[in-house]
Each structure stands twice: as structure tokens, then as C-alpha cells.
Image (cartoon, rainbow, N blue to C red):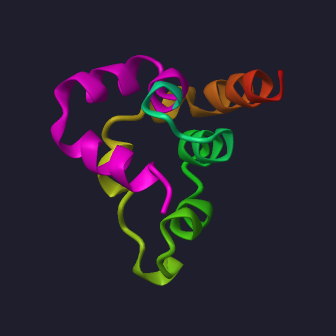
Amino acid sequence: MSKLLDYLNALDTNAVLIHAHKNDPLKAAREFGLSSDEQLALVQQDKQRIAAFLDIPFRDFDALDTLVTHFCIGVKKRLVDACEAELVA
């Protein structure tokens, strides 16, 4: 299983990771050890891809509900574009 589940669980309890994720989600995910595909799915908040990484049915997926509180929706588009560019580079 991917480290993504560990990352999502840590976002519920680890204040240092929550702070790092709020400041730079891509850097926090990379430093945690997530793959580039996991990082991109996380930053894009692609629940279907994340569910696939977690090997759970999408219909049962609710793990990102808490993540939304740690992610600034207003900058999502700009951040996703920047993250995609950084992952390609």
C-alpha cells in the first residue's frame, strides 16, 4: 500500500505536518515520501485516484474530508498548475 494513507492519517494528528501542508502541500508530501503520482493526486484532491491508491472503493471514500480544511481552495488552480509543472521538470 502507498504511503498516502499514512500521510492522510498524519494530517489529522501531526501539527507539524499540518503546518507544512498548509504552507506547501507539494513539498510536505514529497518530504513525507509520497510518489509524484500520489503528490499530484493529493494536490488536485482527485478522490478517485486517491481511493485507487488506497485500494478502497470510491463509493466508500471519505478520507479527504479532513484534508479540505488544511487546503486553501482559493489557490487550488494556481497551485495545481505549479505542482504539475514542478513534477514534470
Q: How many marks?
A: 0
Q: Which residue is painted at 54% across and 45% down in the image? A: 42
Q: Main secondary structure of the magenta part?
A: helix
Residue 26 position, x and y percent, is 55, 27
Q: Which residue is painted at 59% across and 47% down in the image? A: 38
Vertical order, 43 against 55 (above or below): above
Segment colored magenta: 1-29
Q: Residue furthest right?
A: 89
Which quadrant of the view contains residue 76? top right
Is 4 one of the magenta-colored residues? yes
Is 67 one of the magenta-colored residues? no
Residue situated in front as seen by the camera: 23 or 87? 87
Residue 32 position, x and y percent, is 43, 32
Locate residue 14 relative to residue 4 in the image: left or right.
Answer: left
Vertical order, 77 against 47 (above or below): above
Question: Quick one: quadrant of the C terminus?
Answer: top right
Residue 70 position, x and y percent, is 33, 35
Vertical order, 24 against 29 (above or below): above
Q: Which residue is painted at 58% across and 69% down in the image? A: 52
Q: Which residue is painted at 54% across and 60% down in the image? A: 50
